[in-house]
Image (spheres, rainbow, N blue to C red):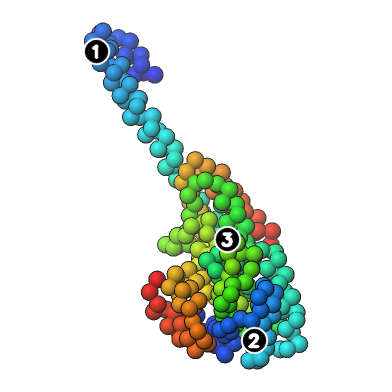
Amino acid sequence: MKLADIIAKDAIVADLQATDRDGVIKEMIDKLVEVGKIDAKDAPEVVKAIVKREKQGSTGFGKGVAVPHVKHEASKTLVATIGRSSHGVDFAALDRAPVYIVVLLLSPPENPEEHLQAMETIFRHLQRDNFRKFLRQAQNVSQIIDLVNEAEEIPA
Amino acid sequence: MNRLDGQTALTKDESAWASGHSIAEHTIRKPMAEVDTNNSIISREVQISNKMGLHARPAMQFVDQANKFTSRITVCKNEQCVNAKSIMELLLLAATAGTKLVIQAQGDDALPAVETLVKLVESKFGEE
């Protein structure tokens, strides 16, 4: 599985406006609605489910990244998007540091294997210092898309 | 014990040498024994049996438990081995239901560490 295959590139948010966790989740879900990845009527439920999931345990796994995710009927196919915050957001991260890169993942409930593969793909890249650094430095959506497309070639 | 019994039969000179030797041996052997204890590697295979596999929430439980021990703990799926105390690394295993993992620990509390983690996996992390 490649990062470019799971990121909905038209749903990337290069400069998140929201300043808190729940706001960021809503902003990214709204974007997925806008590009037709999920139905508008399902959006509030999906946001609620992701927030609930965050409350059970933060997906701010450290190093300035968070990967909020949920398995939900509203998502017909696995889809992810990237949000970048220039000011940093409190995600109650494990290392208590603010989060600058959010990768939000939605997957259909009936395919846990695919969900785990997607998580593997996401973390394989987020683990790499250069990938995180380049993402944080990205100025606009097209730079982030380039990064996603070239993710496999970026040196660690 | 046999060696000590043998020592009593040594001549004075030999005895002096032996005791010196024994001290030297002692000083060498004792730390070696400690190193041995620290280095003993405990390893167990366990199968992921909850339907959802080792996704973020169970992985977090796993990391929380692993961090209660001082031993170095690794989890391997086939040839891929990761640090059991890192959530990001654990998620890199993409350990789906049915995956066989080898949990390996090295250190003072290696045995309880491995036992605890195996039990956690076998409990299906409280899931189906």
Query: Which amino acid, mark 3?
Result: Asp
Q: Residues within 10 Å of mark 3 (few under 14, many from 20)?
A: few
The residue depicted at 63 percent of the width and 79 percent of the height is A106
For the N terminus of chain B, the quadrant is top left
The mark found on residue A95 in the picture is: 3
**How many C-alpha atoms fall within 10 Å of the one at disc 1: few (<14), some, or many (≥20)?**
few
- In this picture, is B32 found above or below A18? above
Disc 3/disc 2 C-alpha distance (Å): 29 Å
N-terminal of the two: label 3 or label 2? 2
Dots 1 and 2: beta carbons under 8 Å? Answer: no
Which dot, 3 or 2, sits closer to the camera?
3
Residue A73: quarter of image: bottom right
On screen, residue B64 versus residue B12, left or right, reads right
- Gap between marks 1 and 2, in whole Å? 86 Å
How far from the left and from the top, in percent, is residue A130? 43, 73
Screen quadrant of the C terminus of chain B: bottom right
Q: Specify whether A34 is left or right of A5.
A: right
Chain letter for the residue marked with disc 2 in the picture: A
Residue occupied by mark 2: A32
Q: Which residue is mark 1?
A: B14
Q: Nearer the viewer, residue A60 or B65?
A: A60
Along the line of sight, which residue is nearer the eye, A76 or A32?
A32
Amino acid at pointer 1: Glu
Q: Is residue B62 visible?
A: yes
Chain letter of mark 3 equals: A
Tell me the SS state at disc 1. helix
